[in-house]
Amino acid sequence: MLRSTLLAASRSGAIRKLVESTPLTKPVVKRFIAGDDVDAAVAATGDVLADGRLVTLDHLGEDTRDASQATATVEAYLTLLGRLQDAGYADRAEVSVKLSAVGQFLPVDGEKIALENARKICSAAGVVGTTVTLDMEDHTTTDSTLGILRELRLDFPWVGAVLQAYLKRTEQDCRDLAHAGSRVRLCKGAYQEPASVAYQDKSEVDLSYVRCLKVLMKGEGYPMVASHDPRLIAIAADLARDRAKDSYEFQMLYGIRPEEQKRIAAEGNRMRVYVPYGDEWYGYFMRRLAERPANVAFFLRSLVTK
Ligand code: FDA
């Protein structure tokens, strides 16, 4: 109930204005968001890399309805990639891109514009020697995102994508993508989805996650295990026992279970942290609140205490 309310709020312009105008919001937001600008993003990247973890950076923004905003997002990624190269981080830090931030929802030629914009980001990533992973948004975008992934991979075979275990289709999508060179980031899924397309019970989502993991770990691709769930991480480690350590990786979000992130990395595993930055933090932040009721209490407390 609380989860669906928060996820509905994550798409409400009125509540967005209220939360964003709350002066005390920012310190709370900072647990999950590296900062407002590229300087903060590069600094956070350095901190994470320093103890042997890897990074994927997300320039925050989604649901763009304005072509110039989509172009600005592309520019932000190009600036970021240049800065990662200058700092000597591009071999360990990649970028994650939401196609809705680069034009997928534009009313005219949205998919075409998103593909062209994503191509520019991939091209720049290739030049600095890093990779791009496409985030996955709600289920109405899955076919479009996987279609754009296929197109991008013709020129940039290292482009990866997220699949969401809560969707009933995902086990089949994993089979389709478990081929050599294919990078798949498997997560549970963070959006409000109808029962017609998505499992609603947590236990059903977890079971689906394990089935998808089995497909990916048996396949020839590069599985990216994106979860903070200790049971799923243990199952993934077990399924990967016969794989080379550099043929898969674990991933978690910035600010969530950082000690566990360091522990996993210290055991010789590839552990990547998803680092979001930018001032369009509202949707991302609300999804993090929805994942864990304790975060809501933490947020509300911050409104009354400094
Ligand atoms: P679960 O939600 O069951 O959490 C397990 C444990 O982790 C909790 O008990 C708690 O200890 C901790 N935890 C989890 N979330 C927390 C939070 N917000 N605050 C504090 N503690 C928390 N989703 C999507 O739909 N599209 C996408 O593209 C992505 N991309 C993505 C990339 C990466 C690298 C990660 C790790 C996750 C995503 N996600 C995502 C989000 C994902 O779908 C999911 O919502 C969250 O990862 C939470 O699910 P868990 O697997 O962690 O399990």
Image: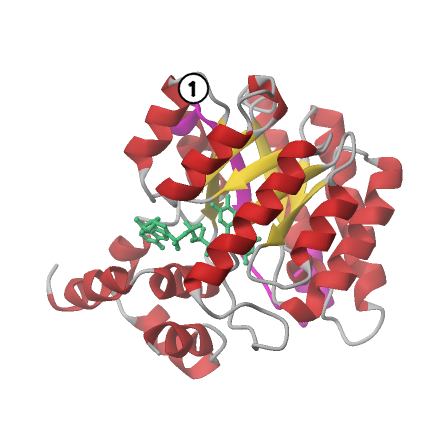
Q: Identify the residue at horizontal 43%, vertical 19% (top origin).
A: 52
Residue nearest the viewer, comparing 208 with 141: 208
Image coordinates for residue 274, horizontal then vertical, percent = 48, 41
Q: Is residue 119 left or right of residue 133?
A: right
On whether residue 65 falls in the magenta region, the answer is: yes
**Residue 153: in sight, yes or no?**
yes
Image coordinates for residue 87, horizontal then vertical, percent = 53, 22
> Relative to 293, is 133 above or below?
above
**Residue 59: in sight, yes or no?**
no
Q: Is residue 63 left or right of residue 190?
A: right
Dividing the image into 4 quarters, which one contains the N terminus?
A: bottom left
Q: Identify the residue at horizontal 25%, vertical 54% (top origin).
A: 27
Image coordinates for residue 264, horizontal then vertical, percent = 39, 26
Quick one: SS at disc 1? loop
Q: Which residue is mark 1?
A: 52
Image quadrant in which you'd find residue 46: top left
Name the amino acid type tagged 1. Answer: Gly
Image coordinates for residue 73, horizontal then vertical, percent = 64, 53
| Residues shaded magenta | 47-72
